[in-house]
Image (cartoon, grey):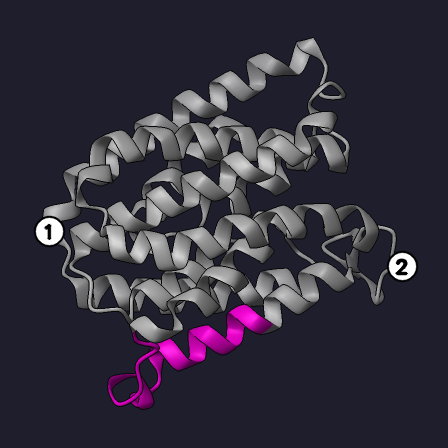
Amino acid sequence: MVSAVALIASGLTLFSGFGLGTLLLPAMLLLLPPHAAVAATAVVHLANNLLKVVLFGRHCRKNVLIRFGGVAVIAAFFGAQLLARLAQLPPLANYTFGGREVEIVPVTFVIALLILGFALFELSPAKNKTQFGPRLLPVGGFVSGFLGGLSGHQGAMRSAFLASSGLSKEAFIGTGVTIACLVDVTRVAVYGIHLSSIGNENFSLMAAACISAFLGVFIGQRILKKVTMEQIRKIVGIGLIFLSIALGSGLL
């Protein structure tokens, strides 16, 4: 199951900028304790982004990388440090869904509200009149990097800002994956202490997930030329809405 999730999510995240970590983490949680699941997901996410940097990194816009990525890396460090403290807060609510107990925890609920706000803006008529623009790239870098370090959900915020920065679809993907890779390196370094708790028997699980994610990248690459930037923006917006609902309700 973990491999299947990694394959599908990796192909989707090539266009949307988010998805792999969000979908893979719940699958990992079925097999590993929370702290180890976050660390294992981060490793797979990093490996997947390294491959995408090799394939698409040449399209990266250096000016965007500096203004957005530099802030994102610093913010990711502090977000990862804060993760342990916020994880100790009690759930906001509990309910039963499909025969299982579901908890709504503070971290994912706040992230869900932020993602929903960006998604609604992305799909609203005001989107064509109001742009984040280059001057807000550092703000986007801070929000994306901090949330990336905090929970791994960095792609939603990054995509919302980069999609409004006038990038071509190639530059959008190349710049996004390069920034994501830098954030992943930062948070994996902070999460490193938890990797020892994964257990040797589960490293094969991580390897299988990495391979499946690689295949997803190549499959997604084949249909890249068939997708327009406007279609990518719609995919991003719709995907963000579904993601925010799932996170806010505690299903992810």
Judging from the image, what secondary structure is the residue with disc 2 in?
Answer: loop
Q: Name the amino acid type tagged 1.
A: Lys
Which residue in the rendered view is the most extreme toward the top? 200
Query: Residue at (52%, 43%) from the top-left corner?
Result: 21
Q: What is the number of the mark on residue 90?
A: 2
Question: Quick one: label 1, few (<14), some, or many (20+) residues within 10 Å?
Answer: few
Q: Contact, CB < 8 Å: mark 1 with mark 2?
A: no
Relative to 232, 99 lies left or right:
right
Classify 4 as above or below 107: above
- Where disc 1 sits, the SS reads helix
The front one of 116 and 55 is 55
* Region of the chain picked out in magenta, as a range: 114-133
Mark 1–mark 2 Cα distance, whole angstroms, equals: 46 Å
Which residue sits at x=35%, y=77%?
Answer: 132
Instruction: Determine if the magenta segment contains residue 119.
Output: yes
- The residue where tag 1 is placed is 226
**Left or right, 117 with reference to 51:** right
Residue 240 in view of the camera: yes
Furthest residue to the left? 225
- Is 115 left or right of 88, judged from the image as shown? left
Q: Residue at x 77, y 32 (%)?
A: 33
Res 155 → quadrant:
bottom left
Query: Residue 156: horizontal and vertical position, in percent?
Result: 46, 60
Q: Is residue 1 visible?
A: no
Q: Of residues 212 and 117, which is closer to you in this image?
A: 117
| Residue drawn at the location 72% of the way across and 54% of the way down | 98
Q: Amino acid at mark 2?
A: Pro
Q: Position of residue 174 (x, y in %)?
A: 25, 46
Q: 247 or 66: nearer the eye?
A: 66
